[in-house]
Image (cartoon, helix red, strand yellow):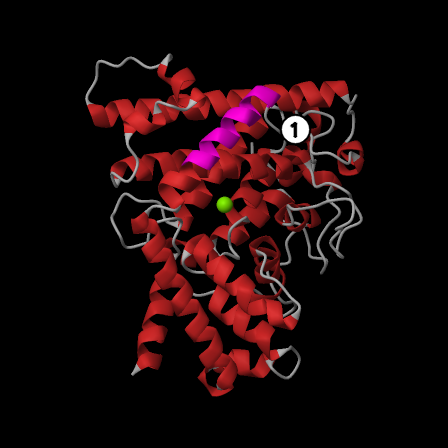
Amino acid sequence: MFLTRALAEQREKQTLAPYAAFSADSRGRVYPEPEDPYRTCFQRDRDRIIHSKAFRRLKGKTQVFVAHYGDHYRSRLDHSMEVAQLSRDVARMLNLNEDLAEAIGLAHDLGHTPFGHAGEEAMNQLLKPFGDRFEHNEQSRRIVDYFEEKKPDYPGLNLSFEVRDGLMKHRTTYDRPVATDTLMPSLEAQIVNIADEIAYSNHDIDDGLRSQILKVDDLKTLALWQAAEKCVNRSMPFDLWVMAMISSLITLMVTDLAEETHRRITKHGIKTVDQIYETPAALAGFSPGMAVWMEELKAFLFKNFYQSPDVSSYNAEGKTVIRLLFTRLMDDFKLLPEKFQERLKIEKPYLVVKDYIAGMTDKFALELYHSLQK
Ligand code: MG
């Protein structure tokens, strides 16, 4: 028997929590399309994301370390896959729509600039004189809505409302994105936000130890590390012990997230997805105790890893590259590829230059930077 889309949709209705985002109830796509015979709309969206050029470019974008620094450090592609995996796991634990969580997780960083957060910071500064700012979530949505080319009938990937909505994660009562009338995104999208935090905290500890920028003795001062240590047998080679520690940390965080989120769902008497859309505070989150531990860990990573001399000098270089590219491209639009020059007819120049630079891999940005220096 084939698992048709109709059957998959029916299974969702029978097995998922009543407040899950059911694919059969999706608010749909901007440009209506015939449904796929076998895949649900969210499965189809996930596949469109994986097959996009912006997704492939993530392998050349820095997470914290320069993407070609070493074979085992995370690129933004690795990070995105880890976020998708954690999101799927938590969605499954809570009986939510795994396909939706996976699609948002894979796409959440598509709009990231080259050179990690340093690149984003530099871009943000450059946009200020234009009364604008750079926000990678918004950029991710611009990519899936406008820049990816799939069919002659429409721009972008024409993803479902729920995936696009999930890409706009920083949502408050006062800041409702134009394209949506909901206060909060789906629970699946809220989970991706926290899965992002879980993923980077853990892979940054791993990459920090691997690069010897972080020391185990320093991590031992953290309450969360101490809690994880209690679950891990010390008598094994160091490398394996580090892996077991990371695994233990992830388990603690994931379990806490699932349990606390479930507690909040019960407390608020959530029965439908529409209630999730209208609950002003996020329902997905850590317990108060874990939230304190996470803050302590993030402050530790900020001071000891992101601000370490090695990472800082790399960040400074990344910022220099972005600044020069922006200035030179703004001075001479002929340096832009033809497709971007075309867009100058309909878009403000600073946005065209921003979109071009934000889409670059580290390597591409560095090569262009060096060629402009000659
Ligand atoms: Mg991320």
Residue 67 % position (x, y): 33, 54
Residue at position x 61%, y 44% in the image: 42
Q: Position of residue 159 (x, y in %)?
A: 64, 53
User: Could you tell me residue 291's position as x and y percent?
Assistant: 56, 26
Q: Nearer the viewer, residue 255 or 289?
A: 289
Asked if residue 168 shows in the view, the reply is: yes
Q: Which residues are magenta?
A: 287-300
Q: In this view of the protein, can residue 39 be seen by the observer? A: no
Nearer to me, 282 or 38: 282
For residue 40, side relative to residue 62 (left or right): right
Work out which quarter of the rendered image holds the C terminus and state it.
bottom left
The vertical placement of 323 against 281, above or below, is below
Q: Nearer the viewer, residue 295 or 201?
A: 295
Q: Which amino acid type corresponds to the residue marked 1 in the rendered image?
A: Arg
On the picture, is 191 further left or further right than 365? right
Q: Is residue 199 above or below residue 358?
A: above
User: Magenta: predominant secondary structure element?
Assistant: helix
**Residue furthest left as drawn:** 237
Residue tagged 1: 11
Q: Is residue 98 left or right of residue 172?
A: left
- When asked about the image quadrant of residue 269, the answer is top right
Instruction: Say which element carries label 1.
Output: helix
| Residue occupying the point 61% across, 24% down | 94
Residue drawn at (42%, 34%), measured in percent from left and top? Answer: 300
- Location of residue 115 by image quarter: bottom left
Left or right relative to 77: residue 146: right
Q: Quadrant of residue 320?
A: bottom left
Quadrant of the snapshot with the N terminus? top right
How crowded is the residue under tag 1: few (<14 C-alpha within 10 Å), some, or many (20+)?
A: few
Does the segment drawn in magenta span residue 295? yes
